[in-house]
Amino acid sequence: MEDLSITSIKSKSKIWLEKMHKLLNTNFDRAFGLDISDKSIEIAELSKLFRFSLENHGGAELPEGVIKDGRIWDEKVLAENIKLLLQNVQPRHVSTNKVILSLPESQVFSHHFVINTPLTGASLRVLVQKEISKIMPINPSKMYWDIKVKGQNIFFMGISKDIAESYVRVCNSIGLDVVAFGVEPLSIARLLMSPEDNNTVIVDIGTHTTDVSVVKGNDELKMTITIPIGGRDMTTAIAQGLNVDEATAEAKKVAVGSGTSDELFFLMEPVVKNISQEVSRVIAYFENTFNEKTYKILLVGGASMTGGVREKISEVIEKPVESIQHFNNFENQGIISPNVPVSIYTSVIGLAMLGASNEFENMNLLRQMPPMHMNSYKKTELFNSGYLSKGTALRIILNSRLTLVIAIALCAGSFMTFGYLWFNYTMNQTYQVKDYKTSKITPKAISGSLNFILNSLNAQNASSSVTSSTTIKKI
């Protein structure tokens, strides 16, 4: 017999409420990826049938000083540049205003720790908040944060509220709806790794920093540490060695690309060696602290493509290091310019993969952000966005939770009306059959019916004879 206790009813009610909440918060559109760094912005949108397919892509340089160390200093200029890029993505415009936004690694706080007491829900979050307060330079109450639990292992990730809100505010100002935040290591893992891959070290050499992350599979981030050394330091070393300005030094470094230049690498070598030593320390820290091995090292980022960098890092840490030469998990790579190293696109396409499919787990820092900060734009203004077609704008306006509720109500009303009509029809048919079956047909009734029919025929014949004789007399 089915359990109808108060506890059971509460449990079932909670499950149905969670299902309804999930339904009402479903994003029916896919989302495109938007990667914002200190120097550039990139956009990519993917679709998926059997494999991921790149629908559009675009990138642009940002003016100096708009963003510094992940903090936005000029929201208006950043918004204008994003909108301009959206208007010029190739080969077609984006099909949605929903976006998955990258978080600046220099502003993201992460920590991995182990708990011995099994806790869940609010008790677990209270424990995490106490633990994080001991080691983080910022109070967790001033952060948007989330955790991922694997057994007794807990991975924490958070970002300052004012930083997160500034990025959402910029997007909202041009009609973009931020549906999720993404972090670069997981974006790269989605693109380059499979769910079966064991602990892999991703070394991402950016402009100002180098991020060293340990990822398992393509959705479990175990640790990430930022080293305050990057491609800009290599450029500075070249500029000082050749006694030229940094713009000239950067141009020389880019011109060499993945080729070899003994002169330039001789000048950059101390910086690369410094990065290599820090990477080696991070790997040793992870393996000793968590008693786990790392099995592969992937090198990504624009500065990683400079000739000699990969070889030097491999030499210092005494382990093989792989550079990214191609993408494995999506098609239509021809949209991307063949003259640009593929490792530059790993982050934005990883974000777009999350937006095109629900098959990946994602830590959701937006869960704690108040709605007033998340959707502070008028949908009717999307008609004048400049980057959406009128048809797309109309679909986005109609594709809302209110529309979903109305559609559910109409479907429920239609179903109830149909059920009512079918019930009445069925009942009427039943009554008719019942009346027919209870009617008694006897020999006397049959004889009476036949006599009535014969009498009617005789009367009709007599009437016809009278009419005929009258007609003959007239003639």
Image (cartoon, rainbow, N blue to C red):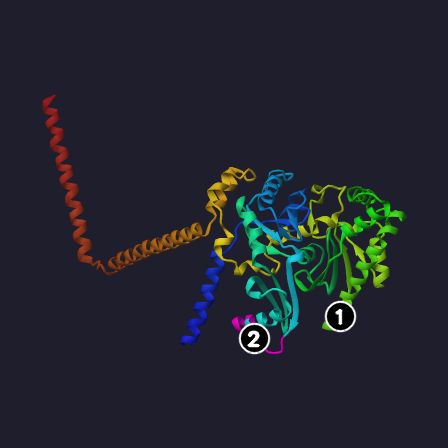
Q: Is residue 327 left or right of residue 380?
A: right
Query: x and y percent of residue 395 in the render?
Result: 49, 43
**Which residue is at 22% across, 58% downward?**
441
* Most foreground residue, 297 or 209: 209
Q: Is residue 239 left or right of residue 137?
A: right
**SS state under label 1:** helix
Q: Is residue 332 left or right of residue 268?
A: left
Is residue 309 visible to us here?
yes
Residue 356: say if magenta. Answer: no
Is residue 48 visible to us here?
no
Tally of numbered tags: 2
Residue 116: say if magenta. Answer: yes
Magenta-drawn segment:
115-125
- Which callout, 2 or 1, points at the residue further toward the start of the chain? 2
**Which residue is at 88% across, 51% downward?**
266
Which residue is outermost to the top?
A: 475
Query: x and y percent of residue 69 in the render?
Result: 67, 53
Q: Identify the mark at residue 287; answer none if there is no mark.
A: 1
* Most foreground residue, 431 or 365: 365
Quadrant where the N terminus sits is: bottom left
Query: x and y percent of residue 123 in the render?
Result: 53, 73
Identify the amino acid type marked 2: Leu
Q: Disc 2 marks which residue?
A: 119
Which image quarter: residue 456? top left
Q: Is residue 202 left or right of residue 120?
A: right
Q: Residues within 10 Å of mark 1 (few under 14, many from 20)?
A: few
Quadrant where the C terminus sits is: top left
Q: Residues within 10 Å of mark 2 (few under 14, many from 20)?
A: few
Query: x and y percent of residue 245 in the render?
Result: 80, 43
Which image quarter: residue 467? top left
Is residue 245 depicted above or below 296 in this figure?
A: above
**SS state under label 2:** loop
